[in-house]
Amino acid sequence: MKHQNGRRKLSVKPAHKKALVRNQAIHFIKNGVLQTTKTRAKEVQTFVEKTVTIARQGQDFNTIRRIKQILPYDQDTVMKLIKEVAPKYVDRPGGYTRLISLGQREGDTAKVARLEWV
C-alpha cells in the first residue's frame, strides 16, 4: 500500500527540505526559470503553484501576509509574485508552470529538469 507517501523526502531532514524548497522557489520567481534535479523541480513546482493560487487573489493585506508566511526570506520576491506573476494567471485555473526534462547530468547521472512559467 502507498498510504502517506505523497511527498518526496529529497534525502534531507524536514527543516532542511523546507528551506531548500523555499530558496529554490524564490530563485524561480526572481529569474523565471529553474534548472535542478527532476525530483527537486517537481517539489518546487507544487510549492510555487500553491503560492501563485494564493497570490491571484490580489494585493490586499491578507494575501500579502499569507505569502510572507510562505516566503519569509525575500520581500521583493513576494511583491514581484503578487504584482507581476499572479496577474498573468488570474483566468487560468491551474498549471502555471511546465517541467521540461533535460536528460541526465554527466557527473552523477541524476535526471535534470527545467522548470519555467507557462
Image (spheres, rainbow, N blue to C red):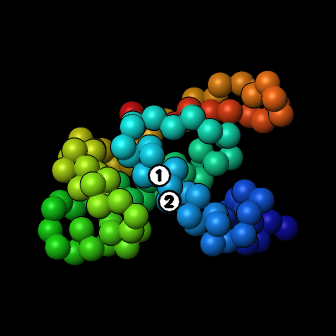
**Percent coordinates x, y for residue 109 in the rendering:** 82, 31
Q: Is residue 53 among the parts visible in the rendering? A: no
The count of marks equals 2
Q: Distance of mark 2 from mark 1, alpha carbons?
A: 5 Å
Q: Mark 1 and mark 2 in contact (Cβ < 8 Å)?
A: yes
Tell me which residue sits at (39%, 37%) in the image: 31
**Left or right of residue 83, residue 24 in this image:** right
**Left or right of residue 42, residue 10 in this image:** right
Residue that lies at the very extreme toward the left in this rendered image? 60
In the image, residue 104 sits, relative to residue 8, either above or below, namely above
Quadrant including the N terminus: bottom right
Badge 1 element = helix
**Percent coordinates x, y for residue 20 in the rendering:** 58, 58
> Quadrant of residue 72 in the image?
bottom left
Q: For the residue carrying disc 2, how many other residues have a C-alpha within 10 Å: few (<14), some (14-19), or many (20+)? A: some
**Left or right of residue 31, residue 35 in this image:** right
In the image, residue 92 sits, relative to residue 53, either above or below, namely above
Badge 2 element = helix
Name the disc covering residue 102, or none. Answer: none
Tell me which residue sits at (55%, 57%) in the image: 21
Q: Which residue is mark 2?
A: 22
Tell me which residue sits at (27%, 54%) in the image: 76
Q: Amino acid at mark 2?
A: Arg
**Left or right of residue 44, residue 32 in this image:** left
**Percent coordinates x, y for residue 60 in the rendering:** 14, 68
Q: Is residue 28 among the parts visible in the rendering? A: yes
Q: Amino acid at mark 1?
A: Ala
Q: Which residue is mark 1?
A: 25
Q: For the residue carrying disc 1, how many other residues have a C-alpha within 10 Å: few (<14), some (14-19), or many (20+)? A: many
